[in-house]
Amino acid sequence: MGLPDAERTIEALAERMRGAVAFDAKFVGIYSGGAWIAERLAAMIDGDHPVGYIDVSFYRDDFSRTGLKPEVKRTELPFEVEGATIVLVDDVLYTGRSVRAAVNELFDFGRPARVELAVLVDRGGRELPIEPTYAGARLAVARELSIVLSRGPEGKLTLTTEAGGA
Amino acid sequence: MLDPQLSAGGELRHLLTLEGLPAEVIVRILDTAVPFASIAERDVKKVPLLRGRSVFNLFFENSTRTRTTFEIAAKRLSADVINLNIGFSSTSKGETLLDTVDNLVAMNADMFVVRHSQSGAPHLIAAHLDRTGRSHVHVVNAGDGRHAHPTQGLLDLFTIRHYKKEFRNLTVGIIGDVLHSRVARSLIHGLTTLGTPEVRAIGPKTLLPTALEALGVQVHHDMRTGLAGCDVVVMLRLQNERMKGALLPSAGEYFKHYGLTAEKLALAKPDAIVMHPGPMNRGVEIDSAVADGERSVILPQVTFGIAVRMAVMSILAG
């Protein structure tokens, strides 16, 4: 099945956010794909958009089944979360579980005024009542496949599918 | 022989000793501790990883720092923590160690943090749990006799890596009562496994074990040769009992030869860090000017200890 071009999809996502997202919204990328996209969006969208990063490993709901993944990154939010407008950024929105974990983690840093969600690709299949505020593309993909975002040597982003549902 | 700490798939199931623990397991614990260290900077200093799990601190021997940091670590992981000072309870009524353990498992313990004056007590508990089909219950050794204190060894490794980045070019001097020190033993195993080229034990003959060279450790009885070129200086606590045991003439005499002063520290590299597992005897093994000086990382060790224990507990429970 054909996947959209990641670079063009980021442009589409940025276009949806322009004029809609708050001028001082802070962009928080969920590791690892969401972190890349948050950095790119901050450079593409006018306004003051500092970038933070969340690794949701300590908040995942499948810890007792799968344990801790080998490389946990450090969550870094270099701004006040209290009272801020936050846009969570992820590469692929599927079940909604990572976003649930990210929202929980965010609130341990303070009480944001508003939290929005921007995703490169919305592939449906939600298991939680979570919807994106902004999506670059919506597509249907077979359950057995996971969509993977990877970054090339010059920062070029690519979408591919792999066996094994995410 | 299979390491009882690891599952058939190489996953960490109990943490009993650093001896024989593969480098990748040690590095994974150290790496996992890095993001845990930053949790202390948050508004809510807690993550929900061990919510609903029960951690039992079984301390058959006194400890303040170790028990407290284990307790804080478990609470920051949202576990329920139960502290038992066994010295004062059941065992004094005649209950055996394993009966105590069985009773606590019947209270749904998920993890035991065990300190015992007898070497091997945590191994005994781990083997008992595995043998009786309760391998979902994990054991962490918080210090057993003269044998091992793996989480102290790991926090020492974490501290060294934090300040020195890499083990492969380091000279580490461990000074004092290596003979009776489970801290030294665990640190030596960890340093060796991670490829530290030069580990030295420095102290009087009466306080150094005889088999050190077999562990790849250089032995020095003189602080001048021992400290020369050290990147890391680890002071050990001199236990007062050693004086009475005729191993040493007096505290004053010991300080003169082996106490770390600014003059002696000048023999090490200019950027050498000074570590101590605590509790310190000021004026016995370390001078206050050094303990409180700018090269001392003794208090950061305590802070890192919480993150390292969180990493150990979350890897075990996963």
Image (spheres, rainbow, N blue to C red):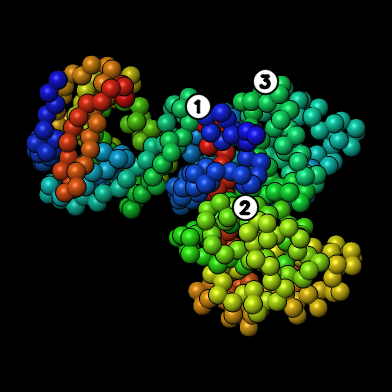
Residue density around tag 2, few if under 14, some if 14–19, many if 20 or more, within 10 Å: many
Residue at 51% of width from left, 78% of height from top?
A: B270
N-terminal of the pair, mark 2 or mark 3, is: 3
Q: Identify the mark at residue B133; answer none if there is no mark.
A: 3
Which residue position holds label 2? B189
Which residue position holds label 1? A64
Residue at 52% of width from left, 29% of height from top?
A: B9
Between the residue at mark 3 and the residue at mark 1, the CA separation in whole angstroms equals: 19 Å
Q: Secondary structure at mark 1?
A: helix
Residue density around tag 3, few if under 14, some if 14–19, many if 20 or more, within 10 Å: few
Q: Please tell me whether residue B157 is drawn above or below residue B5 in the rendered image.
A: below
Q: Please tell me whether residue A64 is drawn above or below residue B184 in the rendered image.
A: above
Same chain, labels 2 and 3: yes
* Quadrant of the frame with the N terminus of chain B: top right
Residue at 74% of width from left, 46% of height from top?
A: B144
Q: Chain of mark 2?
A: B
Query: Mark 3: which amino acid?
Result: Gly
Residue A83: quadrant of the picture: top left
- What x and y, as percent, mark residue B141? 68, 42
Query: Mark 2: which amino acid?
Result: His
From the viewer's perspective, is the residue at label 2 or at label 3 nearer?
2
- What x and y, as percent, mark residue B38? 45, 50
Q: Please tell me whether residue B159 is drawn above or below residue A41 in the rendered image.
A: below
Between the residue at mark 1 and the residue at mark 2, the CA separation in whole angstroms equals: 31 Å
- Residues marked 3 and 1 touching at CB (< 8 Å): no
Q: Secondary structure at mark 2?
A: helix
Same chain, labels 1 and 2: no
Q: Chain of mark 1?
A: A
